[in-house]
Amino acid sequence: MERRASLPGADELFRPTGPRPSRSEAEVSTPGGPAVPDELTLAQLTELAAAEDAAMDAVRGRVGVDVAVPSPPVGALLSWVAAAVSARTVVEIGSAAGMTGLCLLRGMPPRGMLTSIEPDPAIQALASQAFEEAAPPGRVRAIPGDPLEVLPRLSDHGYDLVVVSRSVDHHELRDHVRRLLRPGGTLVLLGAAVGRGQELRSRRAFVQGLIDDEGIHVAVIPLDGGMVLARFGQSAVEA
């Protein structure tokens, strides 16, 4: 598996490319002109909001260069989404060695249940270790296997949130997402613009289909190769 490009650290991400303005220049804006953000403050706030615990640090220490895991800002966004939608039932397609699951559990309600589907045995083993070390007991149902073989066994309209972090057949994925989500449910797709050739064209077509559907509200965030958030209204969920 190719490693998905991840964001650098907050300091690197927000470091100005040109000469840094003096404090007086940063604090004073021309009347009627745009406000000038302070890059240092922005970097510090980003780092604080994306702080990770020891279990997440351990996951990053175990994974190899060919295992894609979300950057800290994207991990923080996953936690935020799970909390914002009060996601009691979540299914993730791809475990990112347990990182996505730990981020989601951090934002889910105390009795929320995560179903984690991972086809790669080595990555599944890493995810299981992460969940054993840090996930609350009884909160994770880990299912090894091909997602397109596992998804048909999951309950219709039984999930508040679906998170996709690995490549699957996006034509089949669309139908499964519509069936799995409750009305008002949310889909998160990571690495939407990652890949090449037919794989990339398939992902682009999938996201374009979400955008074109009037019953789905979509936002694309340019982090970790494209993070797509899609909220499915009543008309967008399969009857």
Image: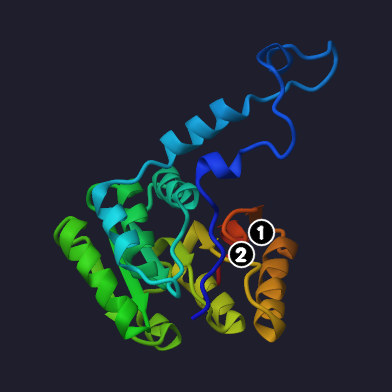
Of 42 and 138, the residue lying toward us: 42
State the residue at coordinates (69%, 17%): 22
Position in image of residue 49 (x %, y %): 43, 37
In-image side of 113 versus 210 (left or right): left
User: Which amino acid lies under the numbered mark 1 shown in the image of this protein?
Assistant: Gly
Name the residue type under label 2: Ala
What residue did someone put label 2 on?
236
Task: Tell me the quadrant of the picture where the C terminus can be found.
Answer: bottom right
Question: Which residue of the protein is positioned furthest toward the front in this rendering?
Answer: 19
Residue 117, percent from left and from top:
36, 76
The relative height of residue 167 versus residue 9 in the rendered view (above or below) is below
Res 190 → quadrant: bottom right
* Secondary element at tag 2: helix
Please indicate whether residue 169 sits to the left or right of residue 201 in the image: left
**On screen, residue 86 above or below 66:** above
Residue 239 in sight: no
Q: Quadrant of residue 147?
A: bottom left
| Mark 1 in CB contact with mark 2 (< 8 angstroms) | yes
Q: Residue at x 70, y 72 (%)?
A: 204
